[in-house]
Image (cartoon, rainbow, N blue to C red):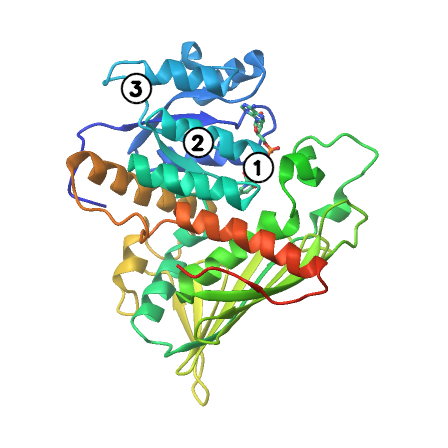
Amino acid sequence: MLNASLNRKLRMALIGGGGAGFIGKVHRTAAQLDGRAELVAGAFSSSMDRSRETALAFGVDPARAYASWEEMLVTEAARPDDERVDFVSIATPNFLHFPMAKASLAAGFNVLCDKPMTTNTADAETLVRLVEETGAVFALTHNYTGYPMVRQAREMIAADELGEIRAVRANYVQGWMWAVDPTQPAERGTWKDDPRRNGPGATIGDVGTHAYNLARYMSGLQPAEVLGKLTTFSGRQLDDYGHALVRCLNDALIMVTVSQVTHGRLNDLSIEIDGDKASLSWRQEEPDSLTIRQTGQPQRIYDRAPGQAHMNDSGNAACRIPGGHPEAFFEAFANVYSSAYDDMIWRVVGGDRDPRSTIYPNVYDGLEGVRFIEQTIASSKANSVWLPLAAR
Ligand SMILES: NC(=O)c1ccc[n+]([C@@H]2O[C@H](COP(=O)([O-])OP(=O)(O)OC[C@H]3O[C@@H](n4cnc5c(N)ncnc54)[C@H](O)[C@@H]3O)[C@@H](O)[C@H]2O)c1
């Protein structure tokens, strides 16, 4: 956390999270976990009653609950300096991210947006331009980048502890699709199999972008091209299983495997990174432990244990409580928020910021994620040819 301070909490507006909505509730909790921000306004649903109900449940003044995000942005932007929100969080179906983020930036707000950033590259490029023009902070909630042992591993790789990175295997495997009864209305997420509201890639966009972002974030590898093979085993319209093989500029290979049709798997995001000195592995279902391996040596398990000799600065800084008391999803999500807050404060107090190189996933990562989805789908449709991916 920076020493610079605004001497007040940042003010948050949330779009989404009403009714059965899942991730909006996580945003609400994570954003306020460290007492650095307060949720003061929201368009929690497109129904006024539901938005107001949610405001009450979230401890927000119902006078600042809106049924329309457009109305919320106009009204909140017109408030005096000591009331106006500092940032807008977007936790709605994919096709709404772009108009909501674009309008939030245009209204002068910082933005935290869920993934995938947009449903096509042209819109993602527009957001990059707007962030560059406005100087706003834009964070994308690839929340797995907030786990202490992920940040620890990233610093270890940057410090050459694994040597040159040769290969990454990033898998995000779920099985919930077998539990969906297509004859029953879904409680949430009906938009996920509708290309108009979800975008062109389902599983590759939903969990594949997380796995790809994590591989890029931890390894620092720069992508050159991708070869994809996506398929559908459950009978849904869009993909539910597949592979994307990315060749990097140094000829390292990243293999991303995604599934939402693997019986019994919950949120099995795992990553293995091979360097020419050592390899490491990490799983989000056991997030407090990181395994390091070297041929001829016993494997080393690094526990999340802040302050102990094996922990580096990035790992320590991402911890809140002593090792052995599990930290997990909410805390990692909150770390993305907290890193974005540092930048928001820095922006106000006038410090130098490099928006391309942030500890939290940013608008450029968002663009990369959308390109990854589009090019993987295009490759798969063209019988798995190699297609270019732009490096940063
Ligand atoms: N970062 C993560 O780990 C993670 C996890 C799950 C979902 N997501 C992403 O978060 C987004 C939402 O996913 P979800 O699973 O919460 O979906 P969901 O279907 O459970 O919830 C969608 C929410 O959006 C709200 N909403 C819809 N239209 C709206 C409008 N016009 N104005 C205001 N609110 C509106 C609904 O009321 C609901 O609360 C998606 O983009 C998804 O990819 C991210």
Q: Amino acid at mark 1?
A: Asn
Q: Is residue 242 above or below residue 94?
A: below
Residue 84 marker: 3
Residue at 41% from the left image edge and 63% from the top image edge:
218
Tell me the crowding category of disc 1: few under 14, some 14 to 19, or many 20 or more residues within 10 angstroms, Cα based.
many
Q: Amino acid at mark 2?
A: Lys
In the displayed orientation, state which residue is furthest to the top: 63
Residue 307 visible at all: no
From the top left corner, tell me how far across and down residue 19 is, in percent: 59, 24
Q: Is residue 185 left or right of residue 117?
A: right
Query: Splitting the image into four quadrants, where does ligand 1 fall?
Result: top right
Q: Which residue is mark 1?
A: 94
Q: Position of residue 221 (x, y in %)?
A: 42, 67
Query: Mark 1 vs mark 3: which is more N-terminal?
Result: 3
Which of label 1 and label 2 is nearer to you? 2
- Label 1 CB-ligand 1 distance < 8 A: yes
Q: Is residue 121 left or right of residue 106?
A: right
Mark 1 vs mark 3, CA separation in Å: 26 Å
